Image: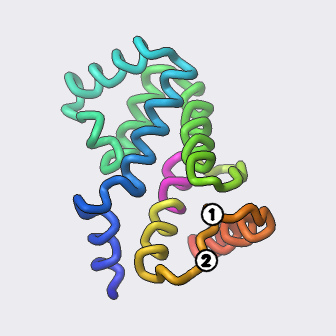
Amino acid sequence: MSLEEREEAVFSPVLKGYPTALLLESIDDSLSYILGTRVREALYDHLERQYHMGRTEIPDRLGEFLRVLYEAIGVGSEAVGRAIAKTMYKKLGWEFVDVRGYQLSDHWEIIKAKAIRDIANPTEPQIARGDDAERKRWELGRLIHIRG
């Protein structure tokens, strides 16, 4: 299976729930927790009106979303991005490792890469199903090494 076929499989409508819904749910949860539901809804409204970006388009336009978030709340957007990443890892049952210089988009790429590997190699052990912290750290280190 080629990389393009794997990516298409991951992001096909049948598999939309993993990982895209994970990101959207994590954004919702984190924004509500940190900024409140009203501010979250105001932010989504601003994205729609000013940038023609619906909530469901955020995963495909994550960089632009993060830029708008920075414009709206400044350096606090980094903490919000980290909270979103932590929420995604928690929902997956993974240990969050705060890597210096990593942003939400970097963690998103790691999760997408894992989703692609899971589909391409369904017989591989699932890290999210285990509690082996050493294996999780090894996996993150391997992904960081690959990104190089």
Residue 22 place in picture, x, y as percent: 44, 47
Quadrant for residue 1, please give it.
bottom left
Residue underneath mark 1: 129
The circle drawn on residue 90 is none
Residue 132 place in picture, x, y as percent: 77, 66
State the residue lying farthest toward the bottom.
1
Kindly identify the residue that appears in the image at 71 percent across and 53 percent down.
Answer: 95
The amino acid type of the residue labelled 2 equals Pro
Kindly identify the residue that appears in the image at 67 percent across and 71 percent down.
Answer: 139
The magenta span reads 104-110
User: Left of 92 or right of it: where is 27?
Assistant: left
Kindly identify the residue that appears in the image at 65 percent across and 55 percent down.
Answer: 94
Residue underneath mark 2: 125
Residue 2 place in picture, x, y as percent: 33, 86
User: Left of 70 or right of it: where is 78?
Assistant: right
**Camera-nearest residue between 136 and 124:** 124
The amino acid type of the residue labelled 1 equals Arg
